Each structure stands twice: as C-alpha cells, then as structure tokens.
C-alpha cells in the first residue's frame, strides 16, 4: 500500500490489514559521474514497493535527505545534520502513530555510519517513549550482505561501484550516464580532514566497470526476499 497514492478511505481500510509501515530513507548524494544523486533513495523506495506487493505493508513516501559526511565536498551532495535527521524520523513516526500504526521499519538506502547511528539513536528514543510499538532500523546492506557475496566480484565494493551501478542499471537504466572508474578512497586513518574530495576524487568506492543489469536484478530480488522475511519476523517479535 503506497501511501502517497492512497485516499483517506483507503488508508482507513489498510489499517484493518496491517499496522506496519516501512519508511524509506535515502540521500541527495554524489554517486560518481555516472549515477544519479538519488541513488540511495531509489534503491530503498523500489525495494519497499516490491515488498509491499508481497506482504501487507504501508509504504511511506521516502525521506530524500540524509547525513552525508564523507561526500560533503563533492558536487551535488546535499547533507542535513544528524539532529535534523533525527527530528524528521521522530516526527514522522509520531504522526504515523497517531494514525494508528504501531510497527515501524526504517529502511535506509544510505548506509553512512553517522547517518545510520543517528537513525538508531532516534529509534531508541521512540522505543522508550511509546510502549506499544515495535521499531526497526535497517540498511539494505544488512539485509542481504551474506547472501549477496557470491554475486559481486569486487572486494570491498560499497559506493557507486559494482553493486549500486548494477542496481540502477536494472531499476532506472536511463539514469545511468556512462560508467565510472574503479576507485577506493584513501582517507588518513584517524585524522579528520576538511577537503574530503582530495582523498576521494571521483566519489566511487568499488568498480562500476563490473556492473551489469542482470546482477542488479538478482540483487534486487534477494534484497526484496530478505525484507519480506524480515517483516514477518518483525511483526511477531516479542521481548
């Protein structure tokens, strides 16, 4: 049930089927010279759409902005603070709670450490405030990392490389503009730097040259399958 396409009546009827909502979080972030700035959002939202066909599930409109620390100096990246990100998540969950929803799955397509930790912290606060809710914060990486290893040739592939390029080639091929070059960032260990692009010139972490649409299809199917399994486990979870 895609919320942005529903009427008020349809939303009311949906509450008879489920009290679970998936809220996709993405980013406006560089993904090399070849992928769109909305790559993280596209991935999370499309997985949610596919899962919502297979299990009763409300799918919220995606949150397009995230906290992007490592790519902050690259053209096109629009980052928000962790406090803003947390307020967005908490306000959205609280409003959905007023509407009768009780199970909240935060699925983030942007897997940056600072971003993900901010969402986890907000989830912990909500869990303490509302005793009648279940809350999960997960990344697509968490869902299918182990099972997807055999599909990927590039060791350490993480950002705008083989995995994400393959997925966008499958989901939105018209948005892929050529092919990026193999690259891995070289940040100095433990040292904070102002000009992050100096250590990560082209914004790729992996090898886009090994990407194919067929790999993207297989990864998408795997992530959707794991998300559906997760939803079923999550809805039955008892502390």
Image (cartoon, rainbow, N blue to C red):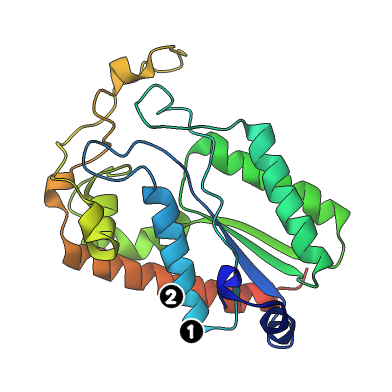
Q: Secondary structure at mark 2?
A: helix
Is 159 placed left or right of 132 in the picture?
left
Q: Position of residue 222 (x, y in %)?
A: 35, 71
Between 133 and 2, the one nearer to me in the picture: 2
CB-based contact (under 8 Å), mark 2 and mark 1: yes
Image quadrant assignment for residue 179: top left
Is 87 placed left or right of 98 in the picture?
left
Residue beneath the point at 68% across and 87% down: 17
Between 121 and 27, the one nearer to me in the picture: 27
Q: Number of labelled discs? A: 2
The residue that mark 1 highlights is 54
- As displayed, is residue 202 above or below residue 154? above
Is 186 placed left or right of 13 in the picture?
left
Q: CA distance from mark 2 to mark 1?
A: 7 Å
Q: Position of residue 162 (x, y in %)?
A: 22, 50
Image quadrant assignment for residue 217: bottom left
Image quadrant assignment for residue 191: top left
The answer to whether one can see residue 123 in this image is no
The image quadrant where one finds the C terminus is: bottom right
The answer to whether one can see residue 151 in this image is yes
- As displayed, is residue 6 above or below residue 142? below
Residue beneath the point at 55% across and 34% down: 114
The residue that mark 2 highlights is 50
Q: Residues within 10 Å of mark 1 (few under 14, many from 20)?
A: few
The image quadrant where one finds the N terminus is: bottom right
- As displayed, is residue 72 above or below residue 163? above
Q: Position of residue 25 (x, y in %)?
A: 54, 52
Q: Secondary structure at mark 1?
A: helix
Q: Position of residue 8 (x, y in %)?
A: 71, 77
């Amino acid at each position: 049930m895609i919320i942005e396409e529903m009427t008020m009546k349809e939303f009311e009827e949906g509450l008879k089927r489920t009290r679970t909502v998936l809220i996709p979080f993405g980013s406006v972030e560089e993904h090399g010279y070849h992928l769109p700035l909305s790559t993280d959002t596209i991935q999370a939202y499309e997985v949610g759409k596919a899962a919502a066909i297979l299990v009763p599930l409300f799918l919220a409109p995606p949150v397009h902005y995230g906290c992007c620390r490592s790519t902050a100096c690259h053209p096109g990246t629009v980052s928000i603070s962790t406090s803003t990100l947390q307020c967005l998540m908490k306000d959205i969950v609280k409003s959905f709670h007023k509407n009768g929803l009780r199970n909240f799955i935060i699925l983030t397509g942007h897997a940056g450490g600072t971003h993900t930790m901010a969402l986890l912290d907000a989830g912990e606060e909500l869990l303490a405030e509302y005793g009648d809710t279940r809350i999960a914060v997960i990344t697509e990486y968490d869902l299918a990392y182990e099972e997807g290893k055999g599909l990927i040739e590039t060791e350490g592939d993480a950002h705008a490389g083989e995995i994400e390029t393959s997925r966008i080639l499958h989901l939105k091929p018209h948005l892929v503009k050529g092919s990026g070059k193999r690259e891995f960032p070289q940040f100095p260990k433990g040292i904070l730097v102002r000009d992050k692009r100096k250590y990560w010139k082209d914004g790729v972490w992996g090898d886009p040259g090994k990407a194919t649409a067929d790999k993207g299809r297989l990864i998408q199917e795997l992530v959707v399958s794991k998300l559906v399994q997760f939803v079923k486990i999550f809805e039955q979870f008892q502390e």
